Image (cartoon, rainbow, N blue to C red):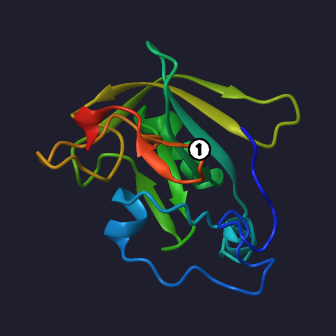
Amino acid sequence: MKLTHGCHSKLDSTRCGGYLGRMTHEELEEGSVLNLDFAKLRKVAHCESDVLPAIAQDAATGEVLIVGYANELALQTARECGMATFWSTSRNELWVKGKTSGDYLKIEEIRVNCEQNSILYKVTPAGKGACHTKSREGVARSGCYYRRLKEDGSLEFVDPAQV
């Protein structure tokens, strides 16, 4: 796949001095326009807690469900309650996945990477889906990676049933 990096590309709008504009949550989560947040880690660095990446992966299928962040409290809570727990860097609060939606992610195993700077929750979904977004039928999507990047730089749904 060839990706361009000039001012004609939507892949790096900040390099060209532009911004694709404010997208609604619906456009961002359901649309076909690529508008990646390359400043995310800068924002995370300014949250009120020291965090590291925390990935939730379906233990049975290997599907990556969520990439979030965890601090010491989130990891301790996850170990105690047996459910995937993250630290919300935007709200600066503990986030037990499923606490409000009922779509919990039961931890089967917690892995630590070689440099001890990220964790992997191997989980079994205990609900309808892991993503906070929903299909047109109102069903939570299995994971957050439900669109793929096409050759032309646009996005498309991986599974038409998830639209």
Q: Position of residue 93 (x, y in %)?
A: 48, 68
Residue positioned 30% across, 46% down in the render? 98
Question: Relative to the observer, which residue lies in front, 68 or 8?
Answer: 8
Residue picked out by circle 1: 75
Is label 1 in a helix, a strand or a loop? helix
Q: Residue furthest top?
A: 60
The answer to whether residue 162 is left or right of residue 119 is left
Q: Position of residue 70 (x, y in %)?
A: 61, 51
The answer to whether residue 134 is left or right of residue 66 is left
Query: What amino acid is labelled 1 in the image?
Result: Leu
Residue positioned 78% across, 30% down in the render? 113
The relative height of residue 86 versus residue 13 in the rendered view (above or below) is above
| Total tally of numbered discs in the picture | 1
Question: Relative to the observer, which residue lies in front, 113 or 156?
Answer: 156
The relative height of residue 11 versus residue 54 in the rendered view (above or below) is below
Question: Relative to the observer, which residue lies in front, 78 or 135?
Answer: 135
Residue positioned 21% across, 34% down in the render? 128
Query: In terms of image quadrants, where is residue 45?
Result: bottom right
Query: In terms of image quadrants, where is residue 42?
Result: bottom right
Residue positioned 80% across, 43% down in the render? 117
**Callout 1: few (<14), some (14-19), or many (20+) C-alpha neighbours within 10 Å?**
many
The quarter of the image holding the N terminus is top right
Q: Position of residue 5 (x, y in %)?
A: 81, 62
